[in-house]
Image (cartoon, grey):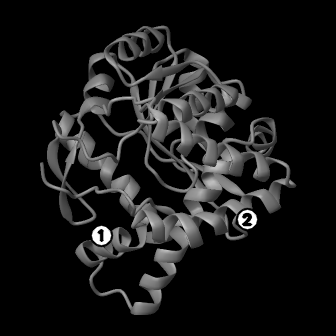
Amino acid sequence: MSKIRRGRAEFLQYLLIAGVLRLAMALPYQTRVRFIGCLVTSVVSPLAGWRKRIRSNLDLIKPDLSDEEVARIVREVPKNFGRSLIESFSGQEFIDRVSATQFTGAGVAELEAARDQGKPVILVTGHFGNHQAPRAALIAKGYRVGGLYMPMSNGFFNDRYVAELTRLGEPLFERSRHGLAEMVRFLKTGGMVGMVADHHMYHGVQIEFMGAPAYTALSAAEMALKYDALLIPIYGCRTEDGFGLEVIVDAPVPNSEPVEMTRALNASLEKLVEAHPEQWFWIHRRWKEH
């Protein structure tokens, strides 16, 4: 976990971000989402070096893509990130939209049965579409869902980030020793816990993702086995209009051993990335070495 900093540079950075968010929140919902998506694509992405990183990842994983398709993904990935960010910061407006979302996929019935039986569930997603949408939609429909989050290095922005995640629903668990202990206690009561599992993890195991080895945490699978929890992949997939979201619930991953179960989680996400490559966060250094 990166160290949280609260220096002058972080404060000035936060003031800039907060000003943009304040401006965006004064706009109607769809205009706000479109505005932030365009801003991140045209300003943030080139300044942050995201375009180069996306192209580098695509060269590694999809070297046969046409120049036109690469250019489209380079443009659309930051747009999706910006839209997801401002959606998740839109509080009740976002909740109202996702609360009416229909769940699709092979795992819907088993997810509902687990809720009715009070069986613990570990919900695993990736940085795809809007990864906050499933948790918000489930909580809005009465599910007991906690979220595990990684704190931001900018302490001022992290305070705002956690506050916004809390508006979408509680409980929240910081990725720390204390937070993980709280999460386990919640899981043991029959709760559901959402995790994002497509980070590069220094202490993970090399498992192929999109055809190349990537250091991957086994923790979701290990916890599912240890606490007799269902392990269910779930995603918030953006619809063609750019504003709607569909919650896709994949079939539960069968119990085996942690590496095989984690391979199954990777395979589940890979299917969606193949179908909608512009919705996955190619900005991550997913395949870096230690």
The residue positioned 85% from the left and 54% from the top of the image is 27
Residue at the limit of the structure toward the front, as seen here: 8
Residue 280's x, y, as percent? 46, 61
Residue 119's x, y, as percent? 48, 18
In depth, the one of 183 and 1 nearer the eye is 1
| Amino acid type, residue under disc 2 in the picture | Arg
Residue 69's x, y, as percent? 45, 86
Label 2 neighbourhood size at 10 Å, few (<14), some (14-19), many (20+)? some
Residue 287 appears in view? yes
Q: Does residue 63 lie above or below 212 as drawn?
A: below
The residue positioned 29% from the left and 87% from the top of the image is 64
Mark 2 → mark 1, Cα distance in angstroms: 26 Å
| Residue to which mark 1 is pinned | 57
Q: Does residue 282 lie above or below 168 as drawn?
A: below
Q: Is residue 140 left or right of residue 79?
A: right
The residue positioned 54% from the left and 36% from the top of the image is 11
Residue 102 appears in view? no
Q: Say what secondary structure mark 1 lies in.
A: helix
- Label 2 vs 1, first from the N-terminus: 2
Mark 2 vs 1: CB contact within 8 A: no
Residue at the limit of the structure toward the bottom, as seen here: 67
| Amino acid type, residue under disc 1 in the picture | Asn
Q: Quadrant where the N terminus lies? A: top left
The residue positioned 58% from the left and 34% from the top of the image is 161
Q: Determine which of the numbered discs, if any, sits on residue 34 in the image.
A: 2
